[in-house]
């Protein structure tokens, strides 16, 4: 059996969006599962709309997702000679011909057909004229006038297209540039692509591509057209649904593994399992369980899945990702023992890395910024004595660990007659500046003894300096 070879051919006229990322993922997973090959091809023949910026953004998004390629990226604009060779072969074999009809003439043919109740299409005027190639001619494929072209689809099942509805379509413009359908087929043939998984918006092109394969006497690849991704309102996915470029999801604090997990579940299932790690997906992915119904993009579900992936990873793994978001907040940090201790305190409650980074800021800043409401509620004049007592008690600890801290708190509660919250909240505000933080003991341990004492004494000085 030949190895499976799949491909992802984005157009560099914009960024990589959710639908394109999912298509890339399906092809990548299937190649990985079968120990085949995944090829990246940039379809940049629309030179007016294609940009280097888009190419870079697409490559960066794929790299962030961890979708690597075995060959490429190939660029269609560097392959014109190959397309011309195949076009010449089709003309020489009688499967294609030169056509000199102008656009106005073709429009008139279509109007006449429409007036007669027929499908508006080119009428084959130049089909048997054997015209020579010139600056004004295009090349058209000779399509069968009768019968059907059957698209056998591993996802949608079989779809039959009436050949009478497919006119002799153009495969090369008069300027010598190959048309999309011709270029795609030649690329897939020369790159030995035998499995094509793509969005069902491409299904309309598939019968034309099959006719080109047949004209070239080539075997057909396996086709699988997956339904589109829709918004929660069942409308075509747009920016208002969260259909931003994939790179923006990184900026929003999503993990690549969570994004991969969510994307694969937009149209593929493995029983009732929702949470997948990358290796798990490569092992279990198949084409048989690609769905036939459109999938709904739900940002809340992505967020919940992201939280699970955050909780699942080790602090060290998360550290590499968190540094990016800390830097965006102006904090230069290292993925060291301190950062990993910080992560451990925030991990259970963080839905995104942005949320985690914002919650981590107080650990890294030398000066605590006190929230006005927190000051008025917990840093009252009488809190100074309590905080001083706490600072002295912490300073006297030889073993700065969880159990001695808990014992110290119990002693403070007994000496002051205050409940746990009455002590913990002023302490929390003194250390973080706010009333919301990780668990008090986890936070104190992550911050370290010296910084903890310094912050408490700074808060005492702040209270005493207030009028």
Image (cartoon, grey):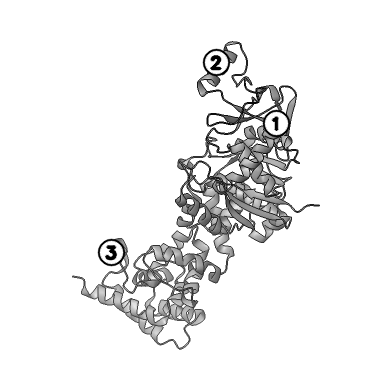
Q: Quadrant of the C terminus?
A: bottom left
* Image point (50%, 79%), residue name: 402
Q: Residue furthest right?
A: 1
Q: Which residue is mark 3?
A: 376
Helix, strand or loop at disc 3?
Answer: helix
Choose mark 3 or mark 1, whichever is in front: 1
- Does 262 appear above or below 419? above
> First in sequence: mark 1 or mark 2?
1
**Disc sitting over residue 111 in the figure:** 2
How many marks do you count on the picture? Answer: 3
Q: Position of residue 62 (x, y in %)?
A: 55, 55
Q: Which residue is mark 1?
A: 95
Q: Position of residue 398 (x, y in %)?
A: 45, 89
Asked if residue 428 shows in the view, the reply is no
Q: Is 298 left, or right, of 159 in this rendering? A: left
**How many residues crowd mark 3 within 10 Å: few (<14), some (14–19), many (20+)?**
few
**How many residues crowd mark 1 within 10 Å: few (<14), some (14–19), many (20+)?**
some
* Image point (62%, 15%), residue name: 118
* Image point (65%, 37%), residue name: 88
Q: Position of residue 256 (x, y in %)?
A: 55, 58
**How many residues crowd mark 2 within 10 Å: few (<14), some (14–19), many (20+)?**
some
Q: Which image quadrant for residue 375?
A: bottom left
> First in sequence: mark 3 or mark 1?
1
Helix, strand or loop at disc 2?
Answer: helix
């Amino acid at each position: 059996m030949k190895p499976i070879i799949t491909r992802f051919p984005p157009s560099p006229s914009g960024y990589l969006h959710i639908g394109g990322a999912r298509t890339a993922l399906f092809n990548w997973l299937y190649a990985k599962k079968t120990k085949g090959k995944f090829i990246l091809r940039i379809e940049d023949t629309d030179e007016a709309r294609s940009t280097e910026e888009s190419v870079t953004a697409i490559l960066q998004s794929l790299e962030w997702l961890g979708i690597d390629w075995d060959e490429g990226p190939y660029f269609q604009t560097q392959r014109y000679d190959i397309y011309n060779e195949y076009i010449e072969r089709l003309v020489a074999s009688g499967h294609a011909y030169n056509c000199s009809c102008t656009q106005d003439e073709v429009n008139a043919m279509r109007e006449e057909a429409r007036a007669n109740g027929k499908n508006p299409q080119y009428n084959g005027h130049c089909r048997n004229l054997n015209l020579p190639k010139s600056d004004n001619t295009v090349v058209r494929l000779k399509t069968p006038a009768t019968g059907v072209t059957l698209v056998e689809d591993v996802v949608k099942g079989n779809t039959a297209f009436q050949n009478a509805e497919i006119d002799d379509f153009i495969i090369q413009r008069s300027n010598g540039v190959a048309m999309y359908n011709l270029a795609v087929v030649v690329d897939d043939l020369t790159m030995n692509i035998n499995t094509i998984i793509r969005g069902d918006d491409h299904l309309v092109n598939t019968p034309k591509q099959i006719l080109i394969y047949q004209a070239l006497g080539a075997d057909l690849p396996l086709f699988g057209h997956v339904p589109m991704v829709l918004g929660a309102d069942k409308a075509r996915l747009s920016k208002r649904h969260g259909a931003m470029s994939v790179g923006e999801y990184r900026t929003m604090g999503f993990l690549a593994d969570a994004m991969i997990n969510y994307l694969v579940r937009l149209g593929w299932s493995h029983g009732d399992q929702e949470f997948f790690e990358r290796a798990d997906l490569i092992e279990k992915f198949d084409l048989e369980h690609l769905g036939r119904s459109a999938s709904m993009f739900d940002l809340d579900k992505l967020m919940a899945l992201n939280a699970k992936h955050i909780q699942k990873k080790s602090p060290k793994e998360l550290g590499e990702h968190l540094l990016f978001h800390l830097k965006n907040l102006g904090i230069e940090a290292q993925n060291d023992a301190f950062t990993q201790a910080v992560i451990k305190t925030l991990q259970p409650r963080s839905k995104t890395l942005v949320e985690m980074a914002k919650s981590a800021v107080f650990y890294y800043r030398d000066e605590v910024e006190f929230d006005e409401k927190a000051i008025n509620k917990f840093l009252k004049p009488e809190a100074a004595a309590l905080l001083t007592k706490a600072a002295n008690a912490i300073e006297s600890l030889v073993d700065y660990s969880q159990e001695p801290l808990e014992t110290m708190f119990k002693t403070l509660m007994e000496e002051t007659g205050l409940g746990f919250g009455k002590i913990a909240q002023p302490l929390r505000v003194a250390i973080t500046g706010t009333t919301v933080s990780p668990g008090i003991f986890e936070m104190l341990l992550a911050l370290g003894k010296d910084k903890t004492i310094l912050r408490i004494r700074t808060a005492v000085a702040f209270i005493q300096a207030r009028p």
